[in-house]
Amino acid sequence: MRKMLAAVSRVLSGASQKPFAGSPPPRHLTVGRKLSSRYEVTFESAQASRVLVASRNFANDATFEIKKCDLHRLEEGPPVTTVLTREDGLKYYRMMQTVRRMELKADQLYKQKIIRGFCHLCDGQEACCVGLEAGINPTDHLITAYRAHGFTFTRGLSVREILAELTGRKGGCAKGKGGSMHMYAKNFYGGNGIVGAQVPLGAGIALACKYNGKDEVCLTLYGDGAANQGQIFEAYNMAALWKLPCIFICENNRYGMGTSVERAAASTDYYKRGDFIPGLRVDGMDILCVREATRFAAAYCRSGKGPILMELQTYRYHGHSMSDPGVSYRTREEIQEVRSKSDPIMLLKDRMVNSNLASVEELKEIDVEVRKEIEDAAQFATADPEPPLEELGYHIYSSDPPFEVRGANQWIKFKSVS
Amino acid sequence: MAAVSGLVSGLLKRRFHWTAPAALQVTVRDAINQGMDEELERDEKVFLLGEEVAQYDGAYKVSRGLWKKYGDKRIIDTPISEMGFAGIAVGAAMAGLRPICEFMTFNFSMQAIDQVINSAAKTYYMSGGLQPVPIVFRGPNGASAGVAAQHSQCFAAWYGHCPGLKVVSPWNSEDAKGLIKSAIRDNNPVVVLENELMYGVPFEFPPEAQSKDFLIPIGKAKIERQGTHITVVSHSRPVGHCLEAAAVLSKEGVECEVINMRTIRPMDMETIEASVMKTNHLVTVEGGWPQFGVGAEICARIMEGPAFNFLDAPAVRVTGADVPMPYAKILEDNSIPQVKDIIFAIKKTLNI
């Protein structure tokens, strides 16, 4: 890659009348820092990209090396290189930045007590939700646990509806009835509060996919903490027995609440825990790695071979929830190290800038747009009224005629409408 | 009676190759089987899963013949993984199928109760009306014979406690068929509490019950026997005991109105209240434990409603004994409501 850029640079420097003059390249491009994809940045290639940027001639796509996945019961894994188009790169960048800023805004609103109760944030894990979505179709299905805001967005809901649900307003995606852990969208089954319960649910959705014969798959996510739940092993057994098109995905962010993986699991090789189910361990901070692994896993399932397991190695910057400062069981240094070396948004940005898929200014513009979108959504989420009290009894049953629901005493009655 | 009127209307209709349905005797087991068979045929999204439901023809033979007819796709034998397969069933329902999830007995549903309550019952509400869960959980509930404490619990009160669930409790064959069909067609999670001791009991099947569209509405009780002196409310197998008690008391000049609840949730209080306002006396009869039971709920609601002022005596409950079910026959017999216990309670209430 470096050689190619250098060559292009030589050609262009020769061709252009005015070599790029002006301020030196940004400092971060000159620091010879090692990225997780082992793609090294040097001054020379940085200079080359600046020349190309100045002429506003972006590459259409670029090829990247990605980390090889550890495999369990698989002869071959996902490819170790992938092509990223400029269009996709910009899309992924915008999506990840949106999730990031949305989560940070939720943090802010929680501290202002505008969001109450549970709030589990996924900043740091953006490559997982965006990368998974990039590897499947909108007609595929996805279910996860309570760290769900990112997935709610990538599955198609707007930041507005998500934040308004967090603030418990009628404009929320569940009309304020569900809150942080109970958001639903088309082909997105939440948002589930009971640790591990979503895994059999996901296997059931996969059963429906197979039953309907439409080549759809179900991504069934759980965390490193949930991975020790018995019902997950029951789901593994049935999914394998019946060859359900279920991709079990363990989002391993190293901590189940305050308990590190070493203190919770006799085997921390989560990708192997499916035993008879083939598995792969994926760099969950690299969106391209996640995307390729997902494409691989989806193809495996669609071919009728049965379930497959993916472990995404990732990290959350926040504590388990907003009630957890997140530093009693891990060091600030550890958090800072991940932030500076493996931040998924930074990794994508560097790749794109260094291979001339985008300019720093362009990405900064996206940042500004995203901030505005989040700000507007937060405004809405704060100003929208709470759901009307009259609707307290609504949505007990589906497709039923209206009936009465008892309130706090026998004289208080609420109407229930489907 | 039903057969005669059937014959008459048959003659009046004068169709070719049509004879009036004779008084048909159908066991509760066959009624449930028929109900499921008809719904499986009617809607290809309906399927049955559970332990031994397919190749074994059902642990209690309730699903006999269904696997032969519908095959592996629609009748699924599961491993012994209640929490897992109940969750799978709920997930399939969320994705648009219409599963019937059988628990070999409802005692085993405790392993899966999180999926029934948190994943099925509450989801439509939590999602603000976006995600329905059209699932049926069915199986035998309550006391059997000699199966002791871990296999004899009645779950009517536990499931009846939860908003978002519908809970039905059939007594006879007609109930069983009509309610299972309504449950399958309902777009909500429905718990169907059957009774193992009733499976083999035959009942007369009225002509309308022989139709493929025979449905019993969920949420409506049935007055099995009209009476004037006292209202006796029950569900499931004890309904039969109440009718026996009523027959005995009738000879002594006491006419009991026996109500078969059919549905635990939503409870048909109107029928119960109207009856109590007529008879001025109430006895509830159930197989489950007394504390926080079905009878306790009925009594509480009677106090809150118009019927309270019509009571001439406190409402009385007849329930299972407040003990884990013992094994020895004499102990077991005295741990569930017997006919003599119901008669005693009725006479006490009437002060006779």
Image: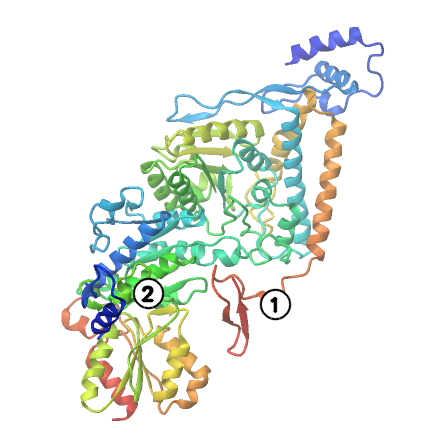
- Name the chain letter of the residue that bears numbered label 2: B
Q: SS at mark 1? A: helix
Residue A233 falls left or right of residue A29: left
Question: Which mark, residue A389?
Answer: 1
Above or below for B14 versus B337: above
The image quadrant where one finds the N terminus of chain B is bottom left
- Residue B348 x/y as whole percent: 27, 89
Query: Disc number at residue B155?
Result: 2
Answer few, some or many: residues within 10 Å of disc 1's Cα (few below 14, many 20 plus, some between 14 and 19).
few
State the SS at label 2: loop
Residue at (63, 50) in percent of width and height: A161
The image shows residue B209 at horizontal and vertical percentages of 27, 65
What residue is at 63 percent from the left and 62 percent from the top? A387
Say which quarter of the image contains residue A102: top right
The amino acid pointed to by label 1 is: Leu
Residue A180 visible in this rendered orientation of the protein = yes
**Badge nearest the viewer, 1 or 2:** 1
